[in-house]
Amino acid sequence: MRVFLIHVRDPQFYALPAKTRAKNGNIRIMGFPPIGIMSLSAVLKRAGHECVMFDQANPETPNEVIIEEIKRQRPALVGLSFLSTTSYPYAKILARQIRAVNPTVRLAFGGVFATLNAQLVKLQCPEVDFVCRGDGEQLILDLAERLDDPTDVAGLTWAKDGELVHNPNRPMDRNLDQWPFPDRESLALDFVESMPLDVPAVLSLERFTTMQTSRGCPWPCVFCDIPIFSEGKWRSRSAEHVLAEFEHLQKLGYGSVYFVDDHFLLQPKRIEAICQGIGERGVRIHWGCEGRVDSTAQHLFPAMAQAHCRTLMFGIESGSQKVLDRLKKGQTLAEVESAVTNAKRAGIEIVHGFFVVGSPEETVEDIRATFDFASKLRLDTFGFNRLCVYRGTPLWQEYRTRLLVNDAEDWYKYFKCTEIDPTCLSGEVVNAERVAGMRRLLRYKFMHYPLQTLRLLRRFLRYMPLRDVVYLIVKPFLGAKRGATKAEVFSRAVEHDVSKEMAAELTKVADDALDQVAHESRLERSRLEGMGNGVVAVGGD
Ligand code: B12
Ligand code: SF4
């Protein structure tokens, strides 16, 4: 069977060095590869199906081109994969455009957002035949076998005789080693490693990809839907399987890898075996991962550094214990300090902290405490995002009870907490504190950790023009927001605030206005391409 798989992105979440091509002729994109569809493609191909992938980060395959290909190649099934609330409007538009030209092709949605909102999505998008929930590997194989009567396909939400059918959940499969490595070589794209896109810096121009070595997280942080998506379980691939993938990637010429695991640092024995294997097998790939600060694997940070772990990212969230407790983060400030110190002592080159501001019950003093705390930590990089809420998280559930959101009307929207929660500070105050806090933090870093800061800047300078690095540093001191500058870097993420706002607004647009928005965004895209500054779109998390 011929299957098309499309990774639907909102254009805010990648950057495109438009004029650069890799040695193999591929277009180079700064962002994460679409590992979801790459995983499914490998599974389908192994089972003898034909699979064609499209990533919407590729400027050469906008909706119109994909639709032409559907008309030409007539796949039996088209799977649309998207991650989050913000890409759902784009997925809807594409699904409608496909349905308009082909009334019979089977359309399927999958990914975290679709999983957590399956029945509502199916009702809102009748043109989509199937909403696929949870892991997709076995599901897509089963679906391909039973396109005409998917009654027995677990994990599927569909309609029969006009009635919604919600098949039972698929039991969680712990054997992740059974699946082939993702199909990374079938898209005409190469990816460039950057910091997570809210830190607008290119770290390495080596061929970059992502890997998933484990799935899920059992903690109860109120703003996160992973525990619900993963049914509170953590599952992992064996060290042996991970090492075999590393060797495979090295042969293909990859130089850097980021793990998209929700919590890599969970099982010390597995980490130890991976690090040991990397040394024994001569794997030279640089890698990065995320984990909790209360990990019991911290004695392995030196082994990780030795095994080429260059980047370690912690969800620190706040410098106020009160706020951490409100967010049910289950960690203490002391744990944060010791994890960051241990990671730096171990020689991990870049230790990153994710923070949020604008949390419920957070005061101005709490925000200031957060920036002061971040200043004193030996972090190399940091991101301070406004806390957002979306359906599927415990916080959304709380807001429902408090009548701050209406599940029936708001389920596909996402909100900054400051917009809807009266226990939050206003958006203006949070933003003003954030700008002031960043200034203080940068000043502190330059004065107290000059060597660490200079080393990092040197690293950025290897891959970014000087003027862009300078802009990155002085931006927090400039005050008022500026529009896009000519001096944009590989990543225009320094400018991404405005586009992010626009993407968030799009989640609130009524269905019938979406097509107009899509048209405008195409025009905007052409405008950016025409600017010729080497960058088409931007990202941020
Ligand atoms: C890496 C990542 C990113 C990367 C981008 C990744 C990319 N490919 O472009 C970056 C940093 C850019 C990013 C950005 C954002 N992210 Co993010 N991201 C993740 C993360 C950590 C991993 C995703 C991943 O690669 N998974 C691995 C692959 C293998 O899994 P998968 O894609 O889910 O696919 C599997 C199944 O879902 C299924 N499947 C998927 N598609 C399909 C299709 C069909 C037809 C079928 C049958 C099955 C199927 O099969 C696959 C294999 O089992 C997830 C957390 C998570 N655990 O999912 C958050 C997550 C998806 N992100 C999230 C959010 C909120 C965002 C942002 C909106 C953040 C922000 N406020 O700015 C943006 C928006 C991005 C966008 N819309 O494009 C939320 C989504 C929550 C929600 N309900 O909306 C998550 C769940 C994290 C969280 N708890 O907060 N993100
Ligand atoms: S924020 Fe991190 S630690 Fe908390 S539940 Fe989500 S993945 Fe787990």
Image: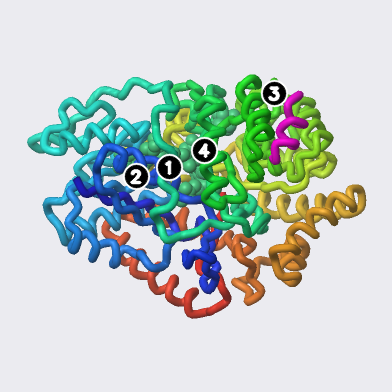
Query: Which residue lies at the image location 22% right of the left edge and 59% below the top edge?
Result: 70
Query: Which residue lies at the image location 12% right of the left edge and 54% below the top edge?
Result: 103
Is 442 situated above or below 297?
Answer: below
Q: Can you tell which quarter of the image residue 102 is in?
A: bottom left
Q: Which residues are magenta?
A: 299-308
Question: Residue flagged by tag 1: what amino acid is it?
Answer: Pro
The secondary structure that dominates the magenta segment is: helix
- Is there any visible trace of residue 146 in the rendered image? yes
State which tag comes first along the sequence, 1 or 3. 1
Specify whether 127 is left or right of 173.
Answer: left
* SS for callout 2: helix
Q: Can you tell which quarter of the image residue 417 is in?
A: top right
Looking at the rendered image, the quarter that the N terminus falls into is: top left
| CA distance separating discs 1 and 3 | 27 Å
Label placed on residue 41: 2
* SS for callout 1: loop
For disc 1, does the CB lie below 8 Å from ligand 1?
Answer: yes
Specify whether 193 is left or right of 172.
Answer: right
Question: Residue flagged by tag 4: what amino acid is it?
Answer: Glu
